[in-house]
Amino acid sequence: MDEIVKEILFPRAAIQKRVRELADQISKDYAGRELVIIGVLKGAFIFMADLVREISVPCRVDFTRLASYGAGSDSSGKVVMTKDIETSIKGKDILIVEDILDTGLTLQYVVNWLKERNPNSLKICVFLDKRKRRKVSFEADYVGFTIDDGFVVGYGLDFNEKYRFSPDIYVIKQ
Ligand code: XMP
Ligand code: MG
């Protein structure tokens, strides 16, 4: 990691421990059922890969991709789905997995869009939650860590497509 990175926020060991805790909770909540886990590309790919390997209920996986248009690095408005899921979710138990919940606009869009397909249930799991930045009232059902404002990278999260590969999560210098 280079000079733009400020400090380690969550080292890999802390991430692994928290992922196991989330997976244990999800496994208990869905015991005896089957899940369809939907990851939001690209940011969720590492978290989702870790999570599904720790969850003990059977699951299918699928992915969606969204683009949000607006000023700069802020997702400031219109969200568009650029890749649909390929699984029929009608009557199924759905868990959406996302790297980070910020304003809430992206996940609110995803939830409204997937609910139209009449799943049996739909819950949200995010690894990071910047609660203070919410622009719409929206809460995730499972949260890894709640964090303060500040741009974070690593563990799937990027800055201009850089740093996704990092096993630790860092804060970027402003
Ligand atoms: P909203 O604001 O709709 O957007 O909840 C969530 C999306 O915004 C991106 N995001 C970040 N990406 N570091 C990142 O790498 C961050 O600190 C950060 N904050 C928001 C991310 O794509 C997420 O899906
Ligand atoms: Mg994302």
Image (cartoon, helix red, strand yellow):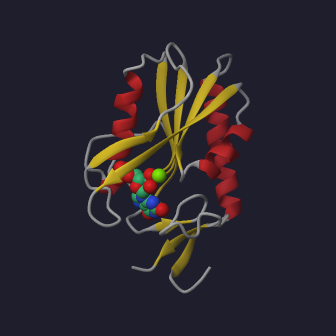
**Residue 173, how many percent across, how many down?**
44, 80
For residue 140, side relative to residue 62 (left or right): left
The N terminus sits in image quarter: bottom right
Asked if residue 147 shows in the view, the reply is no
Observer-nearest residue: 78 or 108? 78
Asked if residue 134 shows in the view, the reply is yes
**Residue 35, how many percent across, how many down?**
62, 24
Assign ligand 1 to one image quadrant: bottom left
For residue 162, side relative to residue 173 (left or right): right
**Residue 71, how many percent across, how many down?**
26, 63
Location of residue 12 with respect to 134 vertically, above or below? below
For residue 8, side relative to residue 54 (left or right): left
**Residue 89, how many percent across, how many down?**
52, 20
Location of residue 7 with respect to 156 vertically, above or below? below
Observer-nearest residue: 135 or 25? 135
Location of residue 112 with respect to 170 vertically, above or below? above
Q: Which residue does the image show at 58% across and 58% down from the upper left?
A: 156
Q: Which residue does the image show at 33% across and 40% down from the upper left?
A: 138
Task: Indicate the quadrant where residue 155 lies.
Answer: bottom right
Q: Which residue does the image show at 34% across and 51% down from the upper left?
A: 68
For residue 4, side relative to residue 48 (left or right): left
Q: Which residue does the image show at 26% across and 55% down from the upper left?
A: 76
